[in-house]
Amino acid sequence: MAMLEIKNITVSYQGSEAVKDFSLMLDKGKICSLVGESGSGKTTVIRAVLGLLAGGGKVTKGDILFEGESLLKFSNEKWRQLRGSKISMIFQDSGAMMNPTKTVGAVFTEYIRTHEKISKRDAWEKAVGMLEKMRLPSGDNIMKSYPFRLSGGMRQRVGIAMGMTYKPELLLADEPTSALDVTTQAQIVRQMMELREEYGTSIIMVTHNLGVAAYMSDHIIVMKDGVVEDTGDRDHMLNASENDYTKKLLEAVPTLGGARYV
Ligand SMILES: Nc1ncnc2c1ncn2[C@@H]1O[C@H](COP(=O)(O)OP(=O)(O)O)[C@@H](O)[C@H]1O
Ligand SMILES: [Mg+2]
């Protein structure tokens, strides 16, 4: 049984279909990327998995099974148990999602204390441990900082550290590196892959950069206008896809010092 199985879902906002007949199978420890231009439906798919569609979005057809159970039938209570523990999400700019009037430490310890009954001091230490895992130097200083004082790359590491605290089985990452420079992107992508190795976490990576997808994924799904345009395992997509749109995206992969970034 696949850990996550999205079966032919259609997602609509106020009656208009944004994603149509989308399917995906993900096994434990695997990374699948969703690639496509802005507006192609990537965020809609992963928000549907987490049951957090904005703008009154609804899954109107199909099903989403997590470990064999339909997420669409989950009660609010079951969702609360799942989110942030078994399934975690990180966003394009985790720092921007944080309350600017609170330090990283206040946000992080609060997050930990909604998931387990431990003292503030223990939560602080746990958070610092996670920051160190993300190779953030002087975790204590970062905890005392306001998010806007940190660089984009540091903020994103904080976001990933939070998302990984409870060793989720599934990590949903929505363009987590898109706002960063290429070197920092590469470091963060490598760290996510290390976390996958260490924890066996499955990852759905949303990116508009096929280079990032090619570097880290086992499987790639190319989306266009709300439907799956092309799909296959990494090597197939890079070397053997006959799809013109996939080929166009491959040509658009940024280069670093003359060489393709992947
Ligand atoms: N909150 C919303 N309300 C209404 N329509 C939305 C909302 N979010 C996304 N959409 C529509 O769904 C489609 C896919 O958007 P999205 O999933 O955000 O794409 P992507 O993440 O690939 O940029 C777009 O046509 C967009 O306008
Ligand atoms: Mg998006």
Image: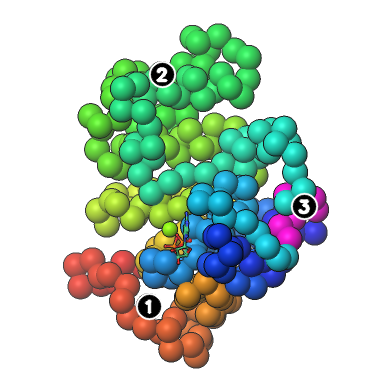
Vertical placement of 100 versus 197: above or below? above
Q: Callout 2: few (<14), some (14-19), or many (20+) C-alpha neighbours within 10 Å?
A: some
The Cα–Cα distance between marks 1 and 3, rounded to whole angstroms, is 34 Å
Point out the image quarter for the C terminus.
bottom left
The Cα–Cα distance between marks 2 and 1, rounded to whole angstroms, is 41 Å
Amino acid type of the residue tagged 2 in the rendering: Ala
Q: Nearer the viewer, residue 242 or 229?
A: 229
Label 2, on which residue? 106
Q: In this rendering, which labeled residue sits more in front, label 2 or label 1? A: 2
Q: Is the magenta stretch mostly helix, strand or loop?
A: strand
Compared across the picture, whether 125 is left or right of 104 comes to right
Res. 208 image quadrant: bottom left
Q: Which residue is drawn at 20% across and 73% down?
A: 258
Label 3, on which residue? 70
Amino acid type of the residue tagged 3 in the rendering: Ser
- Report the span colored magenta: 63-71
Q: Which of 194 and 51 is in front in this view?
A: 51
N-term mark: 1 or 3? 3
Q: Which residue is drawn at 61% across and 47% down?
A: 50
| Residue 96 visible in this rendered orientation of the protein | yes
N-term mark: 2 or 1? 2
Give the residue at the far front of this rendering: 14
The Cα–Cα distance between marks 2 and 3, rounded to whole angstroms, is 35 Å
